[in-house]
Amino acid sequence: MKFADFICREAIRADLTADDKEGVIREMVQTLLDAGKIKPDEQESIVKAILKREELGSTGIGRGVAVPHTKHPSVDQLVGTVAISREGVDFHSLDGEKVQLLFLLISPPDRPGDHLRALENISRQLRDDTFCRFLKRSKSADDIRQLLDEADNNQFGA
């Protein structure tokens, strides 16, 4: 699975303004709403589902990265977005570091395979220090889109 298979290019943000975990999640879900990928009447339910997943254990996986995600019946296919927090956000990460790179995923409950393949792709790419460094330095959504395309084309070491 590639980023192009699930990342909504119109929802990518290089400059999150929220400064806490819930705010960041809300802001990222809003980008998917703005891009027409989720329904307005499902927005709050999706935010709550992601926050509930966070209660099970932080999706801050370390090295400045978090992958908030949930399964939700309002979506009929896997959808996600990418965002950068310049200041970093306390996500209660495993390593205690603030999170700057965020990948948010929402998948239908009946497609667990897609969900797992997307998480696998994200984690594989994020193991590449060069990819992470370039992503953190991205100045625009276009920069991020280009990096995701390069990752999809195996231009990094992952």
Image (cartoon, rainbow, N blue to C red):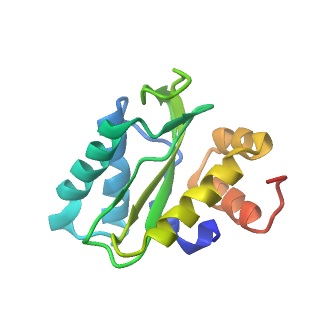
Residue at point 45%, 40% (across, down): 59
Residue 77 position (above or below residue 24): below
Q: Would residue 114 be found to the left or right of residue 43 on screen? A: right
Looking at the picture, does residue 154 appear above or below residue 144?
below
List x then y, in percent, for residue 9.
52, 66
Seen from the viewer's position, the closer of residues 147 and 55 is 55
Q: Position of residue 1 (x, y in %)?
A: 63, 71
Report which quarter residue 70 is drawn in: bottom left
| Residue 51 x/y as whole percent | 28, 43
With 62 as the anchor, is 133 left or right in this view? right
For this orientation, the residue located farthest to the left is: 41
Left or right side of 106 for 86: right
At x 33% / y 70%, what residue is drawn? 109
Rendered image quadrant of residue 135: top right
- Answer above or below: position of 124 versus 84: below
Please, which residue is most extreme toward the bottom here?
76
Question: Total marks drawn?
Answer: 0
* Residue 16 coordinates in the image, percent (x, y): 44, 41
Depth order, front residue of 127/3: 127
Establish if 6 lies above or below 139: below
Image quarter hosting the C terminus: bottom right
Q: Is residue 17 left or right of residue 96?
A: left
Query: Foreground residue, 23 or 126?
Result: 126
Q: Residue at x 42, y 47 (%)?
A: 68
